[in-house]
Image (cartoon, grey):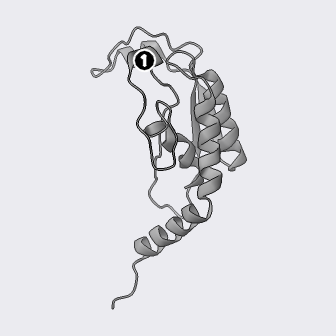
Amino acid sequence: MSAMTQEQAWVERLGGWLDEHAGELVNTIVELVRIPSMVGQESEAQAFMQAQYLAAGLDVDVFEADYGALSRHPAFVDSGIPFAGRPNVVGLWAGVGGGRSLILNGHTDVVSPASCSPAPRHRCDLRRRSAGDMGACTDAAPRT
């Protein structure tokens, strides 16, 4: 049997850490998805994520998107929802040694309950819009 590659060792280590901290991660996700965060009302959920990133030791940048700059991009689509009061929260865990960067992202906004059917039941029994998509990844990101 060949020796484990560095990548395989890292994946195994990460998997072990995730197994060990699964309860903590689920509890934090439950806290996050309890915060009302419909489109246009994400600031409280973003403040929660900012606190999570800071607690994890990340450098944090909070800013609102620049409509003027974004609207000049050829792929820009105007949703009609203003950016004001909808902060972006970025947590940076700087690498060392000149290695490649890893970007983890997610979102905290959810659609109105009037516009969708009930969320499906998920493995950890979180039943809220966004609990089973990238919203859950938003919380897992600062810990992985």
Label 1 packing within 10 angstroms: few (<14), some (14-19), many (20+): few
Q: Circle 1 — which element?
A: helix
Q: Is residue 80 above or below residue 127?
A: above
Tell me if residue 72 comes above or below residue 134 in the rendering.
above
User: Percent position (x, y) of residue 43?
Assistant: 62, 22
Q: Residue at x 45, y 14 (%)?
A: 67
In the rendered image, which quarter contains the C terminus? bottom right
Residue 58 image position (x, y, % from top left): 65, 47
Give left or right: position of 11 versus 20: left
**Where on the picture, by quarter, is residue 2?**
bottom left
- Give the image quarter of residue 95: bottom right
Residue 76 vs residue 13, the one in the foreground: 13
Front residue (pair 136, 125): 125
Residue found at the far bottom of this picture:
1
Quarter of the image containing the N terminus? Answer: bottom left
- Image coordinates of residue 117 in percent, x first then y, are 38, 24
Q: What residue is shown at x 50% (from left), y 32% (from top)? A: 128
The amino acid on which the numbered mark 1 sits, given as a three-letter code, is Ala
Relative to 28, 112 lies left or right: left
- The answer to whether residue 139 of the structure is visible from this angle is yes
- Provide residue 72's location: percent of width, then percent of height: 34, 16
In the rendered image, the vertical position of residue 69 relative to residue 135, given as above or below: above
Can residue 112 be spotted in the picture? no
- The residue shown at (63%, 27%) is 35
Relative to residue 103, is residue 75 depicted above or below?
above
Which residue is denoted by mark 1 in the rendering?
A: 69
